[in-house]
Amino acid sequence: MSTTEVTWWGHSTVWLADSGARLLTDPVLTGRLAHLRRMAGPSPRLPGSPDAILLSHLHADHFHVPSLRAVPGEPVLVMPRGAAAFAARAMPEAAGRCVELGPGDETEIKGVRVRAVPARHDGGRGPWSRDRAAAIGFVIEGTARTWYAGDTGLFDGMHDLGPLDLALIPVGGWGPTLGAHGHLDARAGAEALRRVKAAWAVPVHYGTLWPIGMGRVRRHMFDEPGARFAEFAAEAAPDSRVRVLAHGETLGVHR
């Protein structure tokens, strides 16, 4: 029996170990990011240097330059097509390690196939920047077939991603209006799970980063999405098993 292990370190930062390959998604390793503060869980403690970092889009809470510089070793940086120019300016030392993928493109990391898939989400760095690259998700195929959605709203092509062994699905965020801007909430995340037909699902992108000054108000907006996703998924995708991980907790998916 083979095992794929996934450790959630908060927000969209996931350590995925499959078939000898070690992958890290959208790392945020610091306690502060602009107006956001880490309000739940310990700071990530990576077990070593990943073989590759999967970067879903240019938003600073996913493509966080200080965190990328803090990752040990010299991992390959897999990113959306068009993002390497920004990466080269922000991190000249990493320019030779950038691999750009568009939806349908793929690369291989230590024998594990990493394929870019669509995402419905704004791909720009932000309103203050001209840097743009279409947001993507990833399907990782090793022992297991794993979908890391990045940031996305629902889209018709989700049906084509499954069946999957594991889905890492964003279900919240750091503000009350994110659902209107290409994000999934707990209910829409359950619908995404129904579409992709994953045996296991782990909710991500919630409960970690809160706007400064909101630590004592609207806690439900940050604390609840993971458990609510599990409730909605039990109705929308009863054949899937949901594991709501604590920060730093690991799930092993067996095949």
Image (tube, rainbow, N blue to C red):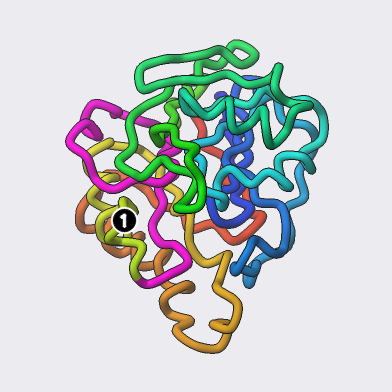
Q: Is residue 158 left or right of residue 19?
A: left
Instruction: Tell me the kind of residue under disc 1.
Output: His
- Mark 1 closeness class: few <14, some 14–19, many ≥20 residues within 10 Å: few
Q: Farthest left residue?
A: 156
Q: In this view, does 106 lie to the left or right of 74?
A: left
**Residue 226 pos. (x, y %):** 43, 63
Residue 198, placed above or below residue 33: above
* Residue nearest the viewer, comparing 34 with 235: 34
Residue at left offset 45%, top offset 49%: 202
Is 174 colored magenta in this rendering?
yes
* Residue nearest the viewer, comparing 28 with 86: 86
Residue 37, placed above or below residue 238: below
Residue at left offset 66%, top offset 65%: 41
**Residue 246 pos. (x, y %):** 59, 61
For label 1, the SS is: loop
* Residue nearest the viewer, comparing 127 with 236: 127
Residue at left offset 31%, top offset 64%: 231
Q: Magenta segment, which residues?
A: 147-176
Residue at left offset 27%, top offset 36%: 196
**Residue 43 pos. (x, y %):** 74, 59
**Figure label count:** 1
**Residue bearing the label numbered 1:** 181
Residue 194, placed above or below residue 161: below
**Residue 19 pos. (x, y %):** 61, 20
* Residue nearest the viewer, comparing 222 with 100: 100
Quarter of the picture containing the N terminus is top right
